[in-house]
Amino acid sequence: MSGLLRDQRGLTLIEVSLMLLASATFMAALAPSIRAVVFKAQTTAATTYMNQIVTAVNASIGTVGETGCRRFRSSGGCNGPNVSLIVTDGDMPTRCVAATGCGGGVSSWNRLVNGTTIDFLERHIVTNNPGGNPANNYPIGNWKGAYMNAPIDPDPWGNRYMLNVEYMNNFPNSVWVLSAGPDETISTIFTAVWPVAVGGDDLAVRVEQ
């Protein structure tokens, strides 16, 4: 009878503590592998999405630029002012500073949308209203969108994708679709020219010009 009672006793506090410690140790050992899997999934998703943006941008420029400008314009189709930076929805990432070892020229990525020189990508490839104003539409005969489905999402870290379209059709400068990456800090210079290495853990896909 006493043996049966011993077999049915509950776990002691020490035994529970040892089990929890073993579980915590096991999870700690797995954590780097889990982080690596998540990081790979996020970077793969971001790169895939950036390639979709590049495809849409090339399709758009190939039609609205039929008169030869191959530029994004803030008004008047090919005859309007150039757009310098186009961004998707999402938070504005931080930018590295020279003191941390990055080069200069990264601040141009971090500018607020003003509807003229800096605009939302959706207005050019999903809806035909640059600057959010129908008066700025590209010529209907040229604009053949939508070139991408809405909404255009932020990157996996909640930040916006950015395109330095100021350099469209302006060789040797390169146009990039850029994500600040997991550290959410821009480390790539705005004037980066192919095949320059992308800064930090930024992710970038080059737009063919």
Image (cartoon, rainbow, N blue to C red):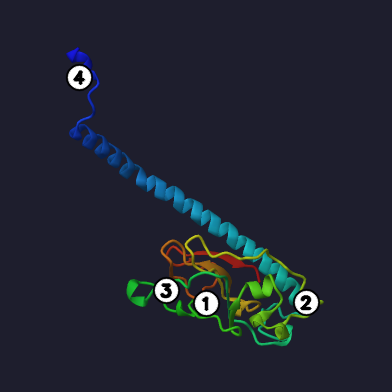
Q: What is the spatial separation of the Cα atoms under label 2 and label 1, in whole angstroms? A: 26 Å
Residue occupied by mark 4: 6
Q: What is the spatial separation of the Cα atoms under label 3 and label 4, in whole angstroms? A: 64 Å
Which mark identifies residue 87? Answer: none
Pair 4/2: label in front = 4
In screen coordinates, is 182 left or right of 163?
left
Which mark identifies residue 95? Answer: 3
Q: Which mark is first along the chain, 1 or 4?
A: 4
Q: Which mark is first along the chain, 1 or 3?
A: 3
In screen coordinates, is 164 left or right of 136?
left
Q: What is the spatial separation of the Cα atoms under label 2 and label 3, in whole angstroms? A: 36 Å
As shown in the figure, which amino acid type bears the numbered disc 2? Answer: Glu
As shown in the figure, which amino acid type bears the numbered disc 4? Answer: Arg
In screen coordinates, is 83 left or right of 18?
right
Q: Which mark is first along the chain, 1 or 2?
A: 2
Which mark identifies residue 66? Answer: 2
Q: Which mark is first along the chain, 3 or 2?
A: 2
Q: Position of residue 10 (x, y in %)?
A: 23, 27
Residue occupied by mark 1: 191
Q: Is residue 208 above or below residue 136?
A: above
Q: Which mark is first along the chain, 4 or 3?
A: 4
Quadrant into which the N terminus falls: top left
Q: Is residue 150 visible?
A: yes
| Label 3 element class | strand
In screen coordinates, is 189 left or right of 152?
left
Residue lying furthest top in this view? Answer: 1
The picture quadrant where one finds residue 68 is bottom right
